[in-house]
Image (cartoon, coloured by chain):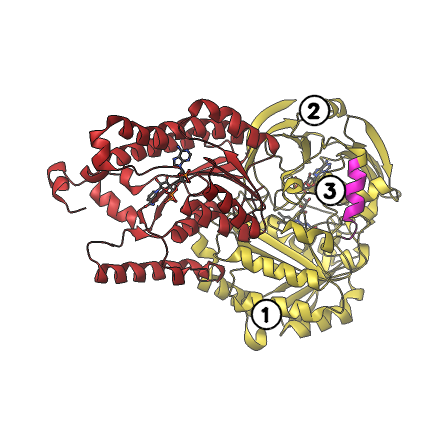
Chain colours: A yellow, B red
């Protein structure tokens, strides 16, 4: 097992802290690490795609789970997969697609681990149909404080605390997943332009039930009557029989390009002001007003960011903040107000997505609840951003909504219990299961989880 | 823990009655700070500073700390860190001394050096060790422009700040990559704020710009009314506090207040000594 001292951040590259990083290759090594961790505790880390400080642990131990990456069994008949927690969704896609199966839920990047997907109870563009990731997990093996390994079945309190529990109940070692049947690796994509926010919400309400995947890119630079104008893309897996002849020869091919290297540093000036507004203009005008049935490769549709140089990853030295919140149905006025405030401020927001959520996740700290979710990236160096986001938090909390903890790096701790009503249950289960606080992260310290 | 904008949740101030430190604490409490430890020599002023910050909503306690008693630093400061993580430590203790008298009384001069430099060396190393052990945190040290190019008029104070400044830079390099951030702050002449002008504009979007502009206007006004008294090198505790908060956000290593000092001092640094001696500064 390799051990080193490293300075770690989340994907947003804010608030670096230093920890001892262990890279266990077996359950025994993982258990030994947890048993031997000092007073500052330990936390599991996958591919570090969480934007904030969820997978770092200042002065303590961090278990890099990516060496535990075996796919143990695949039942090609039922689509049930048993795999280690360090397996990435990318790897699962490579292995499962040729067998006619697809991961039940994928975020907009494939480069997350199964452990991270459960720990953050991630959602995808199919959230309104399929719910969040942990709904498709039958059981998991959890390494708890003291180094004991428990099998945790879906539907039990420990499962519900672990799903979305940000690694704070223990280290997930393996999981049994139910996958989704597909007969090709192609998507049929419908694109529409929405002239403003109301138009978008209407289209999402009217048509979402007809699609498995749906999300809208929203132009947060547009103001006035165009506020909230968006490009809505929705898609379906194409059945093999509907493919054109050429694609039918290798219907399940999955050969996305390699992950482009992230630039060391992108000048903030490139992302802000006029260039950003112009890019948005081009993106909006460049999208078809209405187009149906466009055939797209799966990766191009679901993971467009994985194919791009990662601009948003590194604006300047101070990194970026991803802000994602959800407010319930009936709270459209709050959503409108927030969108208006963001666009009036002319924030250089990038990767802004708006989506309609369906039924929430089982986890006590799972983020999704039925309603509207908006996510955007902002450079952390933006003056006044801290207070601005605080004021958005207030609006979100007042509307009964919540912000996403896996992306958070700045929430005011006082708002947490209003946003997550099951927080008390989570805390008491943790107090019982892990009285000494073996599992801790920078996020758990910051938010007193 | 600090958030993405470098705003700490817990703050330890050494020199708990310092005006600059209190202005900084007020700003940080308005952001995320909930725990404040004010270290200093016990005095009514220290207690009233604690009461004032407590009224703003923070959990405040005072800690006995004497910069001149280096031997005690390990225990007193160690105790503070043992109670919980400290996200930001602010070194604000220091004395200006009295140049005229200090030249006459070597022991008085030594006191300046011991407070500003030796005291900071021992306290600095203790805090650096504790921050390193917790794997994160910022150490903010108030140096002074007086240490950048030492003048005839205050070379005893200036040389102590020069030592402090060099020590802090070295410590910052030693801690580079450990998750601990060290920041040197070099204010010009700090004058108390005229009462009406407490600038809270920092809350607004164009904060940085506004304050800087306001500072420049104020400096210009000061210059016009009292050419020998004030200059663009003058600043206020609140402006220093704002620069510290911005520096924390940007994880800066060096902060000049006002910012224009950076250019002024880089020119002054190269002025030959015969000429420098004759400059009216
Ligand atoms: C470009 C991009 C797009 C994204 N899109 C989406 C999206 O559409 N929807 C969405 O929901 N999220 C999205 N995310 C966020 C990402 O999916 C989650 O943060 C996910 O948790 C990252 O997985 P990871 O393996 O990198 O985990 P890390 O970032 O390393 O860890 C995340 C959390 O999971 C915990 N964890 C990791 N492994 C384990 C384990 N084995 N046992 C217990 N706990 C563990 C960690 O402690 C931490 O709390 C996106 C991120 C990026 C960078
Ligand atoms: N004011 C300026 O123009 C200026 C300019 C540049 C840099 N600075 C530096 O900035 C820092 C703070 O400035 P300020 O104007 O806010 O200072 P201040 O109000 O004069 O406060 C100085 C602080 O240092 C403390 N102190 C002095 N001797 C001490 C000792 N032996 N042990 C413990 N604490 C001691 C004082 O505590 P007591 O209450 O017990 O005396 C007081 O809290 C200082 O380091 C100063 O050198 C100031």
What SS does tag 1 mark?
helix
The correct choice, above or below, for A67 with respect to A418 in the image is above
Distance between the Cα atoms at labels 2 and 1?
49 Å
- Chain of the residue displaying label 1: A
Asked if the beta carbon under badge 3 is closer than 8 A to the nearest atom of ligand 1, the reply is: yes
Q: Earlier in the sequence, mark 2 or mark 1?
A: 2
Q: Do pointers 2 and 1 mark residues of a single chain?
A: yes
**Mark 1 highlights which residue?**
A340
Q: Do pointers 1 and 3 mark residues of a single chain?
A: yes
- Chain of the residue displaying label 2: A
Distance between the Cα atoms at labels 1 and 3?
33 Å
Segment colored magenta: A421-431
Dots 3, 2 in contact, CB < 8 A: no
Q: Do pointers 3 and 2 mark residues of a single chain?
A: yes
- Please state the total of marks drawn on the protein image: 3
Q: Nearer the viewer, residue B165 or A240?
A: B165
**Mark 2 highlights which residue?**
A33
**Mark 3 highlights which residue?**
A119
Q: Residue at x 65, y 51 (%)?
A: A303
Measured as percent of width and height from the top left, residue A208 is found at: 77, 66
Q: Residue at x 49, y 46 (%)?
A: B49
What SS does tag 2 mark?
helix
Q: Nearer the viewer, residue A366 or B220?
A: B220
Q: Estimate how packed mark 1 is, as few (under 14), some (14 to 19) or many (20 or more) residues with alpha carbons within 10 Å.
A: many
Measured as percent of width and height from the top left, residue A41 is found at: 67, 30
- In the figure, is residue B159 to the left or right of A80? left
- In the figure, is residue A40 to the left or right of B168? right
- Locate the N terminus of chain A by quadrant: top right
């Amino acid at each position: 097992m390799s051990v080193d001292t490293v300075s770690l951040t989340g994907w947003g590259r804010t608030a670096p802290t230093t920890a001892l990083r262990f890279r266990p290759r077996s359950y025994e090594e993982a258990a030994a690490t947890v048993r031997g961790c000092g007073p500052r505790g330990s936390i599991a880390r996958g591919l570090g795609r969480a934007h904030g400080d969820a997978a770092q642990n200042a002065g303590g131990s961090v278990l890099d789970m990516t060496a535990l990456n075996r796919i143990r069994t695949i039942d090609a008949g039922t689509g049930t997969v048993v795999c280690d927690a360090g397996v990435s969704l990318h790897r699962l896609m490579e292995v499962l697609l040729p067998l006619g199966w697809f991961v039940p839920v994928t975020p907009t990047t494939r480069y997350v681990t199964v452990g991270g997907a459960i720990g953050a109870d991630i959602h995808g563009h199919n959230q309104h149909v399929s719910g969040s990731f942990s709904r498709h997990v039958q059981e998991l093996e959890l390494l708890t404080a003291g180094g004991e390994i428990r099998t945790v079945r879906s539907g039990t309190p420990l499962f519900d605390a672990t799903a979305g529990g940000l690694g704070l109940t223990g280290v997930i070692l393996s999981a049994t997943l139910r996958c989704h049947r597909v007969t090709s690796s192609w998507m049929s994509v419908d694109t529409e332009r929405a002239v403003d926010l109301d138009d978008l919400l209407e289209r999402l309400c009217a048509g979402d039930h007809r699609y498995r995947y749906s999300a809208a890119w929203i132009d947060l630079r547009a103001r006035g009557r165009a506020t909230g104008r968006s490009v809505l893309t929705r898609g379906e897996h194409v059945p093999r029989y509907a493919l054109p002849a050429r694609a039918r020869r290798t219907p399940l091919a999955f050969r996305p390009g390699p992950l482009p290297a992230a630039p060391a540093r992108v000048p903030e000036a490139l992302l802000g002001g006029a260039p950003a507004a112009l890019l948005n203009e081009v993106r909006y005008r460049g999208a078809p007003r209405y187009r149906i049935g466009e055939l797209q490769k799966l990766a191009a549709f679901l993971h467009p960011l994985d194919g791009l140089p990662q601009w948003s990853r590194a604006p300047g030295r101070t990194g970026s903040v991803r802000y994602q919140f959800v407010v319930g149905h009936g709270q459209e006025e709050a959503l409108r107000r927030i969108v208006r405030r963001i666009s009036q401020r002319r924030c250089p927001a990038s990767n802004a997505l708006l989506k309609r959520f369906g039924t929430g996740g089982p986890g006590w700290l799972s983020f999704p609840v039925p309603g509207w979710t908006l996510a955007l990236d902002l450079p952390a160096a933006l003056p006044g951003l801290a207070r601005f986001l605080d004021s958005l938090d207030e609006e979100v909390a007042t509307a009964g909504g919540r912000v996403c903890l896996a992306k958070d790096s700045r929430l005011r701790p006082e708002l947490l219990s209003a946003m997550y009503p099951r927080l008390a249950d989570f805390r008491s289960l943790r107090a019982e299961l892990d009285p000494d606080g073996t599992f801790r992260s920078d996020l758990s310290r910051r938010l007193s989880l | 823990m600090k958030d993405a904008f470098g705003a700490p949740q817990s703050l330890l101030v050494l020199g708990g009655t310092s005006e600059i430190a209190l202005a900084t604490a007020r700003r940080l409490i308005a952001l995320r700070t909930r725990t404040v430890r004010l270290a200093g020599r016990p005095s009514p002023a220290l207690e009233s500073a604690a009461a004032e910050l407590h009224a703003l909503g923070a959990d405040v306690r005072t800690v006995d700390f004497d910069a001149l008693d280096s031997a005690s630093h390990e225990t007193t400061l160690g105790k503070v860190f043992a109670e919980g993580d400290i996200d930001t430590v602010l070194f604000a203790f220091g004395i200006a001394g009295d140049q005229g008298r200090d030249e006459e009384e070597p022991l008085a001069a030594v006191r300046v050096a011991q407070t500003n430099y030796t005291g900071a060396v021992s306290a600095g190393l203790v805090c650096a060790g504790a921050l390193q052990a917790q794997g994160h945190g910022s150490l903010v040290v108030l140096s002074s422009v007086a240490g950048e190019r030492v003048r005839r008029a205050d070379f005893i104070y200036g040389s102590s700040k020069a030592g402090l400044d060099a020590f802090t830079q070295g410590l910052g390099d030693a801690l580079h990559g450990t998750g601990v951030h060290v920041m040197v702050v070099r204010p010009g002449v700090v004058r108390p704020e005229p009462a009406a002008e407490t600038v809270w504009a920092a809350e607004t979007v164009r904060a940085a710009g506004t304050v800087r502009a306001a500072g420049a206007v104020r400096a210009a006004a000061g210059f016009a009314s009292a050419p020998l008294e004030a200059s663009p090198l003058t600043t206020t505790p609140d402006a220093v506090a704002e620069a510290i908060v911005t520096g924390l956000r940007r994880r800066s290593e060096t902060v000049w207040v006002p910012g224009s000092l950076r250019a002024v001092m880089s020119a002054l640094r190269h002025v030959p000594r015969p000429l420098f001696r004759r400059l009216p500064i």
